[in-house]
Amino acid sequence: MTPRSVGRYDSHDPESYERPRRHTRPRTKERPAYDDAVPAIVVTVDRGRFTCLLDDGPDKGTVITAMKARPLGRKAVVVGDRVRIVGDTSGAEGSLARIVLVDERRTVLRRTADDTDPVERVIVANADQLVIVAALADPEPRPRLIDRALVAAYDAGMEPLLCLTKADLADPATLIGIYRPLGVEHVVTQRGADPANVRERLVGRTSVLVGHSGVGKSTLVNALVPDAGRSTGVVNAVTGRGRHTSTNVLMLPLPREGGGGGVDGWIVDTPGIRSFGLAHVDPDHLIEAFPDLHDLTAACPRGCTHASGEPECGLDEATGDQADRVASFRRLLASRESSEY
C-alpha cells in the first residue's frame, strides 16, 4: 500500500510532521527569580548602556557596563536607581551584564521639557537632597528658576539646599532673605575657596546638583571630587549666560575626608538647565511639604488652588512670620504657572 501523502511530502518524510504554530506555547506569569542577581547602583546612562557600580560583596565598587534586559520593556532606568544585574560582572574591558530588576525608588526627581509637555522625565532616583547652585553675579541670579527647582524638590520629597557661589563678586544677603521665610537652608562659597562648608552638607547624603550654565557647578564638583574631571566653561559677556559643559547626568562618590578610601556620600552632577518644566506638579501635593500651611487649608473650599486672589482661602488667615511664609509659597505657585525664567 502506497503511503498517504501529506501535502507535497510523504508521511515518512521529516518535513511532513506538523511544526508548532505561533501562539500555541502555554503562557505563564512565572518570571525568573534571579536569585543570583548582584545589587548595583546606576551612575550614568549613555545611549542604551548603563554604567553601574557593584553595591555589595567583595567586589563592591567594581565598574560594570550593562544593558537593560528585555523583560523590563519600556521601563526607564535612570541614574541613582538601585538595580540587580546578571551575566558578566567582572568589569573586564568589553564585558556586558544585564539589568534584570529595578528596586523600588525612595524618591524621584522629575521635570517636563516645558509647562505644556505632558510627558514627565525622571532625572534622578533615590536622592535625598537637591542642591540648587546659583551664582550671585556673572551670571546674575535667576530667582524664578530657583523657585521652580524648589517646587521640584518639594514635589519629590527631597530636602532643598541653596548653594550660592561667587560670593567674592556680590553680597548674598538679598538672595538669602528671599528664601528665609520658606526655611530653605543655604551655604555660601566663592571662587578658589575651600569647599569644606559645602562638603559638610553633602556627607551621608545623595545630593543632586542643579543650576543653569556658568554658575560654577562643575568647578564645585571638581573641588569636591578631585578626580571627577568635569569640564568647566565661562560666561558669555554679551548674553550673560554660561555654556553647557556637563552633557550627561553623572553620579560620583564623595571621597572620605582624609583619604584612605571609602565614600562619605554621593554627588549627582547634572547638565546646566535653561528650563524646568513643572507640568507634572499638583499644587495640592506641593503644599503638603509645608505642614503648618497645609493645616491652614483645611477650611478651604473645594477646588481652591491656594493662590493669591482665591476666595475664602485658608492661607489668607496667616499673620506675622507665617504670612511671609504664605507669600513665599504663593510665589512658588506663581512660578509654576509662568514660563519666564
Image (cartoon, rainbow, N blue to C red):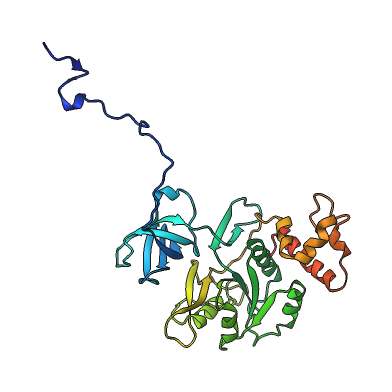
**Residue farthest toward the left in the current orientation of the protein:** 1
Q: Residue 296 in the image: x percent, y percent?
A: 83, 61
Quadrant where the image shows the N terminus: top left
Q: How many discs appear?
A: 0
Q: Nearer the viewer, residue 137 or 117?
A: 117
Q: Is residue 294 left or right of residue 130?
A: right
For the point 62% across and 83% down, the residue is 166
Determine the residue positioned at 17% across, 14% down: 4
Q: Is residue 118 left or right of residue 25?
A: right
Which residue is the extreme one toward the top? 1
Whether 301 is drawn above or below 208: the answer is above
Judge left or right: residue 258 versus residue 160: left
Task: Answer whether residue 160 is visible to the viewer in this image.
Answer: yes
Q: Position of residue 264 (x, y in %)?
A: 50, 79
Instruction: State the quadrant of the C terminus.
Output: bottom right
Can the viewer see residue 136? no
**Residue at x 88% of width, y 63% of height:** 317
Q: Position of residue 315 (x, y in %)?
A: 84, 62
Residue sitting at x 42%, y 61%: 50
User: Which of the 4 quarters of the picture holds residue 280?
Assistant: bottom right
Between 179 and 314, the one nearer to me in the picture: 314
The percent coordinates of residue 34 (x first, y second) are 38, 54
